[in-house]
Amino acid sequence: MKDRCLAVFVLDVLERDRLERLWARGAAGFLAKLALHGGIRDLVGRDLFSEHGTAWTLFSGVSRVVHGQYDYRQTRPGSYGFMPGDTEASPEVQPFWWRLGPQSRLLVVDAPETLPLRGLGGIQVADWLTARAASIRRGRTVEPPTLAARFRGPLCAADGGAEYRRDSTVTQDRQVLARFREEIRRKADVCGQLAKEVRPELVIVGFQQLHTAAHRFWRYRHGGPDDLVDAIDQIYCETDRAIAAIAAALPDDTDIVVAGLYGMVDLYPTTGLSEAFCRTLGYHVAVDSPPARMRLLDMVPSSWRAEVGWWLPSRLQENLMANRVAATTDWSRTRAYSTSTLYSTTIRVNLRGREPEGCVSPGEDYESLLNEIVADLRSLRDVDTGTPAIARIVLPARHYGCGPHSMLPDVIAEWTPRDQFRDSVSHPRALMKQPAPQYFRDSYHTYEGSLLGMGPRLANVQGPIDLLDIAPSLLAILGHEVPSVMLGKPTLAGTVDTQNSHH
Ligand SMILES: [Zn+2]
């Protein structure tokens, strides 16, 4: 029987306009070839509203309303506390390849937001060369563990290759750029070798460097040394070559899918404005006199607190933050509070029966409170231009028709992109201000995904594709039944593989 292979490359960030500019210059030729075959399709669907958790949906085929992932730190259900995102998944929200079973031949490398699964055939590795971007970050894990030596290596940039480093020098940025390029090449080399050994039926490779580089080098788009002005372009071209090299190590008729999960925009943190919004407008009410020890906790450096939203926080930091909020809040009069994300505003209603000291009744009171918050958010204006400061509002209870959710926030607001720090914003009843945070990163995301693909088993269709359709499509292409827990349709699957079917 002839080996057939399906290869899926996941780029957490894929800026469409940048890619098109590169193509116009004759660069990024492998992705251009894919686009020539099947076009570049929009990823669409209800789950596209948060950076974290999108890959969970992509790989599991199960919606965010079920897996509940939306941020690196999330509300701990039934409490006012927080927990890291990426908590253990229930079996139905595991990545689709766990359904391929012990006879499978997998090569899964740095697939975002997943961990290697036991009991499958082939090789899986997580947190190997991920440029410290969106991933579970539990340290490198390899399945089977006996192959860990294949993934050793000294690849870690001088400053960790962080997506943001305050006051980094040109020299440091150059080192990080060189390191990212080296990581991408190394990933291509090792994946190419492993592909020849494993002869995989399914390859999944994540390239997180596009994401980390986009944040890290964003500031050079307005000028700087030539090699840094086009640093992000260099990472695109390196990634394009890496995908081409891995594809070249796979059989000729391999089906290839490239998914980009989000784009980039200008935006600085808005955490202080989210807090100010809830407190100034009287949604979040403080106790009259906070306990003395809490005033001490208020002195936790703001840099520390700001970064908590991004780095997986220690339990201690989380407890400090949660204790501080809990001890300084009058829950009997607090109807809603900000859960302090970095770039979006996420608001939790203090709902009776869900929050420990909830005071808002489910039903009519909850709904009218949502309306009030939405109206207030829509009234926010940039002080200098008078233009709306909020671009998009998602109310998961209505968005999914699920009612108040145990994990998801009740309100998620995305701010209008802006290339300067927003230190204040106006509302008809108040002016809200925020201090400049230590974590002063100048870029954030759009929730516009892209899909490219080419191969004999892919449907020859164009136009938008729902994020929820991808996992069922990939399973169908591999000749497996689509389980009922996946609500999407296998629209990406053309000629379904029957010779390889396990059924
Ligand atoms: Zn990001």
Image (cartoon, rainbow, N blue to C red):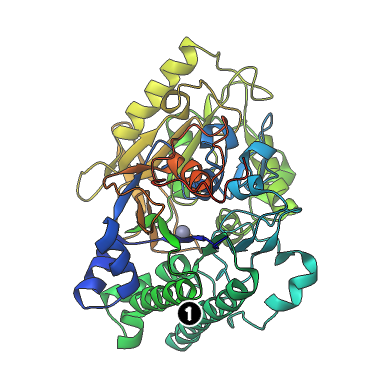
Where is the C terminus found, in terms of image quarters? top right
Q: On screen, 145 above or below 473?
A: below
Residue plotted at (37% across, 73% down): 236
Residue plotted at (55% across, 13% down): 361
Q: Is mark 1 within 8 Å of ligand 1?
A: no
Q: Is residue 257 visible?
A: yes
Residue nearer the viewer, 189 or 383: 189
Q: Position of residue 156 (x, y in %)?
A: 61, 79
Residue plotted at (64% across, 60% down): 105
Q: Position of residue 369 (x, y in %)?
A: 44, 20
Residue nearer the viewer, 316 or 384: 316
> Would you identify the image quadrant in which residue 11 lies?
bottom left
> Would you identify the image quadrant in which residue 436 lies?
bottom left
Where is the N terminus found, in terms of image quarters? bottom right
Residue nearer the viewer, 185 or 158: 185
Number of numbered markers = 1
Secondary structure found at label 1? loop
Q: Position of residue 187 (x, y in %)?
A: 55, 76
Q: Is residue 155 left or right of residue 398?
A: right
Query: Callout 1 environment at 10 Å: few (<14), some (14 to 19), or many (20+)?
Result: few
Give the residue pinned by disc 1.
168
**Furthest residue in direction front, as rendered:** 1
Residue nearer the viewer, 476 or 283: 476
Q: Is residue 419 visible?
A: no
